[in-house]
Amino acid sequence: MSSASNRRRFLAKAAVASGFGASLVQRGFSWEPPTASATKGPFYPVPEIAKQKYYDADLTRLDPQSPVADGEQIIVRGVVVDMDEKPLDQVIVEVWQSCASGRYNHPQDKNDRPADPNFQYWARILTGADGAFSFRTIQPGKYPGRTPHIHYRLVAPTRPELVTQMYFESQSEYNKKDGIYMELKPEQRKAVTVGFESKPIGSPSTDAAGQNEKLPTGYFRIVLGPKNDAKATQPM
């Protein structure tokens, strides 16, 4: 038997043993691996995001009449797909992060960085038929002991929830010193590390001012695992 055949048999057995099942073998391994999971950490919002007064997709201010938060504004766009690259509809995407100073809005965050009363700190978004999501936020500050990052919690119909973290390509030096980031496999780190470039934030349906405004924009592709994957999220 050829070495290629032996390797394919080994991969097939590994796929079944890992819980992905025979269906992946039958598809010839034409699937994307799930996005790496992470713990929620100690600073998931209290009360939960759905019970907060403000949780829309613009974290840079509390409402349209509020002052703008400190820090560099960025746009995060992304899509939620399954392992066959099919966009997933009606997925709740929650995000939370530190403000520009590196402080979380959480009673357990005792670091001496100043909080920002104008920053929303979190958002809750629902994907459409195209699986897309988008939000406007501030480049998170460096929390003591961690590289800058944004937390995500995804709740999809008929699937276990996924908690993960997004990192910044521009923070490569800090990323290399972050224990949680470096615990990931190289391919997992690549999948959760996002590059940003200046792009217009408007769309053809917006006014001229919106089309002309440019902000650093990144794209985060999130892959959810199989419906029967009970280990999509690690415990807190």
Image (cartoon, helix red, strand yellow):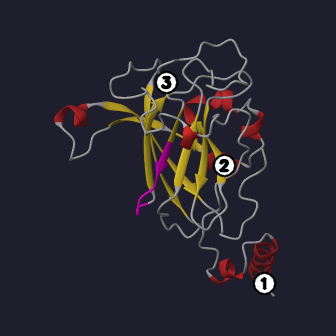
Q: Is residue 176 magenta?
A: no
SS category of the residue bearing label 2: strand
Q: Earlier in the sequence, mark 1 or mark 3?
A: 1
Q: Which residue is mark 3?
A: 119
Residue count near mark 1 (Cα–Cα under 10 Å), binned few <14, some 14–19, many ≥20: few
Q: Which residue is mark 2?
A: 163
Q: Earlier in the sequence, mark 2 or mark 3?
A: 3
Q: Residue at x 43, y 54 (%)?
A: 132
Q: Residue at x 67, y 27 (%)?
A: 174
Residue count near mark 2 (Cα–Cα under 10 Å), binned few <14, some 14–19, many ≥20: many
Query: Are the residues tagged 1 and 3 within 8 Å (C-beta)?
Result: no
Q: Amino acid at mark 2?
A: Val
Q: Amino acid at mark 3?
A: Phe
SS category of the residue bearing label 1: loop
How far apart are the two marked residues, 1 and 2, measured between alpha carbons?
Answer: 41 Å
Picture quadrant where residue 171 is located: top right
Position of the N terminus by quadrant: bottom right
Q: Residue 29: image x %, image y %? A: 64, 74
Q: Residue 135: image x %, image y %? A: 44, 40
Q: Residue 30: image x %, image y %? A: 59, 73
Q: Which residue is mark 1?
A: 2
Residue count near mark 3 (Cα–Cα under 10 Å), binned few <14, some 14–19, many ≥20: many
The residue segment tinted magenta is 124-130
SS category of the residue bearing label 3: loop
Picture quadrant where residue 212 is located: top left
Q: Residue at x 43, y 27 (%)?
A: 62
Q: Earlier in the sequence, mark 1 or mark 2?
A: 1
Q: Is residue 127 magenta?
A: yes
| 39 lies above or below 148 | below
Residue in the foreground of this view, choosing between 53 and 36: 53
Q: Give the numbered dot on residue 192.
A: none
